[in-house]
Image (cartoon, helix red, strand yellow):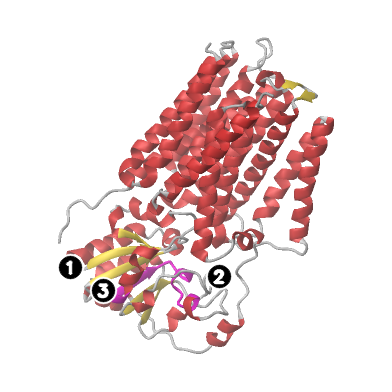
Amino acid sequence: MEIDPFIFRFSIFILAIFVGYYVVWSVTPSLHTPLMSVTNAISSVIIVGAIIAALASSSDSIFDTSSIFGFLAIILAAINIFGGFLVTQRMLQMYKKKKKDKK
Amino acid sequence: MISPNLSAIFYLVSGILFILALRGLSSPETSRQGNFFGIIGMVIAITVTFLTVGNFSNAIIYVFIFLIIGGAIGAFIAFKIPMTAMPELVAGFHSLVGLAAVFVAISAFLNPEAFNLGFPGDIKLASLIEMSIGAAVGAITFSGSIIAFLKLRGIMSGSPITFKGQHILNLIIGLSIIALIYLLCSTQTSSLFWGMIVVSFLIGVLLIIPIGGADMPVVISMLNSYSGWAAAGIGFTLENSALIITGALVGSSGAILSYIMCKGMNRSFFSVILGGFGGEATSTDKQKKDKKPVKSGNAEDAAFLLKNASSVIIVPGYGMAVAQAQHALREMVDTLKKNDIKVSYAVHPVAGRMPGHMNVLLAEANVPYDEVFELDDINNDFANTDVAFVIGANDVTNPVAKTDPQSPIFGMPVLDVEKCKSVLFVKRSLSPGYAGVDNELFYRENTLMLFADAKKMTEDIVKNI
């Protein structure tokens, strides 16, 4: 009997949870806020679903109910992608080491 | 147009780049590179999606227009937002991920052919389950984050909203979502799908309203986790590995942060989620209230103490964020350093309204990150320090957590500020902290209370040093 492809995806999922577990524990606590904003940005990769939905319409009716939801999701995800990465960048730029010690 | 196999490989690559993005955050030096990996991963994922669909009809123009509109809004927000508003920004962003997940699930439900999931009214069972879960979790993330946003922004009161039978009501609604998904899968009726989404929006609101302001670090982390699980659910529907990997990463990241935050408060995850914490005073503080003298001083006294110290530890808290006192604080520390006084910062895991909140604010004020220490790394140093300068923190310094088993915060890890020779406590009044517990520190011999706005007091101290 063939293995359902779902099982493969499920395996990826479980393995990624483990990867996430170990990677996130190694994040330094002082960077927990950037961690949240960057996870926010990357979870907006959901935009791929939105793009598929938006492009799925036939060419004579670009906006049907299904694709409108796709277009709306594109806006939401794009806000998140740009906002998330840029605000993370802005925060990370602020983390500086001691310049020179005046001891 | 590229083959599905090739695009699957590219999605895997972008998934790996996202892992590297998180990995980079293990130290501030590698973090910027990590963020860059994240951006590349996203560009790959989006480009590959365009190439895979390969349908370059007029619709693609609109896709770009919407992409640019969203991107411009996002960039505008990212550059304009003040650092003190980070918690509500993150909550707001979570809500967008949640809503995007709902919208994608809706369009997949309305037009399953586009995603190879079957036909309207005859969607593959597994896909239907996956998209329902994605939509339900997404909807909970959306409405929950909106409530968290309103509470953090101060539009809604931060105090818990509770009513009788709340938990039972939530349980019934939760079970009804499962029942709706079950019925939806067996009948494929679209009204059940809409009903399930509406009910999920409702439970998101009900879950967050009983949780109070200072429990927000847990709530934000939890919603972060939810947004990941929602993305993973959609990832299964779309059979997209980038989305599955990312969802799993974000889901576990949020879960770990929630765990760290709960541990920082010595509370179980469930007691936070059930909410209603804070507000009622316990019997022990009632007895103390009217006794015990409090020593209070002004900026001059504080400046005198600080000037004559040789080492100082700063303990910032949410009050510093509210008063926007981080820049004034940094100025004060600079003056102290000029007088050869050793200064370091002690940050409690749950100080502020989100994980790492204080660190970002201090970084914004140009405090080097190697002067900022976590609870475990600095707690032993208080005994050898002359002055502890507590600015806007309260519960996280309360020695009651170590001594009084009756206290609601007993067992919570606290900063041992009382071991310093003297403690300067900047606070507006003697009111108890979020946990509703009187801080014993106020009445200690070696504590000097500075009743003022954190920013104004710090500025006055600078003038007097």
Side (left or right) of B88 relative to B159: left
**Residue at 39% in and 84% down:** B295
Q: Is residue B201 above or below residue B2?
A: below
Instruction: Tell me how far mark 2 sits from mark 3, CA to CA.
Output: 30 Å
Report the chain holding disc 2. Answer: B
- The residue pinned by badge 3 equals B306
Side (left or right) of B401 relative to B332: right
Give, as a single range, the part of the protein colored magenta: B383-401
Residue B56 figure quarter: top right
Name the kind of residue labelled 3 in the image: Leu
Residue B435 image point, x, y percent = 55, 70
**Residue at 20% in and 51% down:** A99
Instruction: Tell me how far mark 3 sits from mark 1, CA to CA.
Output: 10 Å
Name the kind of residue labelled 1 in the image: Asn
Residue B376 image point, x, y percent = 38, 64
Disc 2 secondary structure class = loop
Report the chain holding disc 3. Answer: B
Residue B439 image point, x, y percent = 48, 77
Report the chain holding disc 1. Answer: B
